[in-house]
Amino acid sequence: MKLNSMQDISAILPQSLTAPLPGRIARSLLWLLLILLVLLALTPWQQNVRGMGRVVAYSPAERQQIISAPVEGRVSRWLVKEGSLVKQGQVLVELIDNDPLLLQRLADERKALLARQSAVENRVDTFRNQLRMAEQARPQALEAAKARIEMAKQRRSVAIQSLDAAKAANKTAGLNLTRQQKLRSKGLSSQRTLELAQLASAQREAERNRAQATLSAADSEITALQADWQKLSADTAASIEKARAELNKAIEDQNYVQADLLKLQTRLARQQTQTIIAPQNGTVLRLLANPGADLLKAGQAVAILVPDTQARAVELWVDGNDLPLIVNGSRTRLQFEGYPAIQFGGWPELSIGSFAGRVSLIDSSDDGRGHFRILVTPDTDDIPWPDARFLRQGVRVNGWVLLGRVTLGYELWRNFNGFPPLILPEPELISKAKTDAKTTDSTEKKFYE
């Protein structure tokens, strides 16, 4: 008999051999699915916070920097090109001034300032000598005035003595005149003797008056000399103060000239140094000025330099909602752009091509859009990061900050309900932060040394 279809074959086979097979397979698949779901629900899952960022130098001084023009001018010629490796102190570019005669004019101005400085210094010396001589002459002049006053006092003493003698002689002549007048009245003396007594009395009276006038003149002279001494003291003091004021004014002018000279010398030195050198070893990233075309101002950017560094780090930007879950020392996994990698966020131990890191810095403020920067450094307990030729500054990075470990079922339930990741209790968080911080400090020190 010939069989034309599968229906004929199934009709020939016993019913007990064909009917139970699909059911058994379905039941087996169902049980396998249930077991798989249970295993997946109990599978450990690493919670994480994702961020995007880039590779940077760990030290801010070794990050991309702008090289500026020190003076005004134009680019004469570039001694490097984009991509050139430069050493510290190497000349990058030569500048020329817009005015070709500026250096000559500055030199002439410097000569004029030097001549003015010499004149002002001579004035200072002259006024200093005048002040010294005035200070030396003042006590001598005052001593001479005091000596004249003492001489006048001595003449006054002589005048007093002369006045006393004249008074005594006048008194004696008066007594003699009285005696002669009495004798004459009695006829015991001649008229001639009386007249001589009257003459002597008149002379003694004149001498007394002259002595009195001399004493008055001596008193007036002492008063005048004392007034002259006071005037001389005031005049010499005023002369000293005037000389001191002129000296201070000359010193002030000297300081102004010195300041102008220093400014001119600084400007002249800057104009004479019309080359720009590399501040440190690195690579020229961009040349921002064209030779002979661009007019440069002092401080204007002319090139961008990327310094050489082996101490690299990664700055990641995370959302502000996730920031409270991150502490210094938190572990991270990083995937670098251009480096092949397979990353499982929940199972970091199964990741291939990703690298470990530690959070070393968390910014205290956002970027204005609710994102916060964290700085990640290499974890020395894991495999080292790729070489510098792969991790150039600016390479983009995907990062995962590892949090608590939960089951996959809990994680699915959390995502389904929109709950935040697991937050550790505060005492445990503080203890973990302190431990991780100590570990991070020691590993970073070991790595960068």
Image (tube, rainbow, N blue to C red):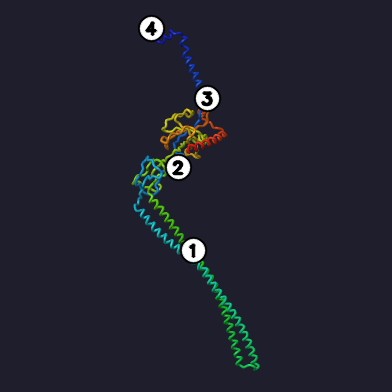
What's the CA distance linking mark 4 and mark 1? 143 Å
**Residue that badge 1 annotates:** 244
Q: Label 3 is placed on what type of residue?
A: Leu
Sort mark 1 into few (<14), some (14-19) or many (20+) by Cα contacts within 10 Å. some
**Residue that badge 2 annotates:** 61
What's the CA distance linking mark 1 and mark 2? 53 Å
What's the CA distance linking mark 4 and mark 2? 91 Å
Q: Quadrant of residue 253?
A: bottom left
Q: Label 1 is placed on what type of residue?
A: Arg
Q: Label 2 is placed on what type of residue?
A: Ala
Mark 1 and mark 3 lie on one chain; the one further toward the N terminus is: 3
Mark 1 and mark 2 lie on one chain; the one further toward the N terminus is: 2
Q: Quadrant of residue 8?
A: top left
**Residue that badge 3 annotates:** 42
Circle number at residue 2 = 4
Q: Secondary structure at mark 1?
A: helix
222 relative to 43, above or below: below
- Picture coordinates of residue 123, whole percent (x, y): 44, 63
In the displayed orientation, state which residue is furthest to the bottom: 187
Mark 4 and mark 1 lie on one chain; the one further toward the N terminus is: 4
What's the CA distance linking mark 3 and mark 2? 49 Å
In the displayed orientation, state which residue is furthest to the top: 1
Q: Is residue 354 visible?
A: yes
Residue located at (44% from left, 36% from top) = 55
| Disc 4 and disc 2 in contact, CB within 8 angstroms | no
Q: Which-is-in-front pick, marks 1 and 3?
A: 1
Q: Label 4 is placed on what type of residue?
A: Lys
Mark 4 and mark 2 lie on one chain; the one further toward the N terminus is: 4
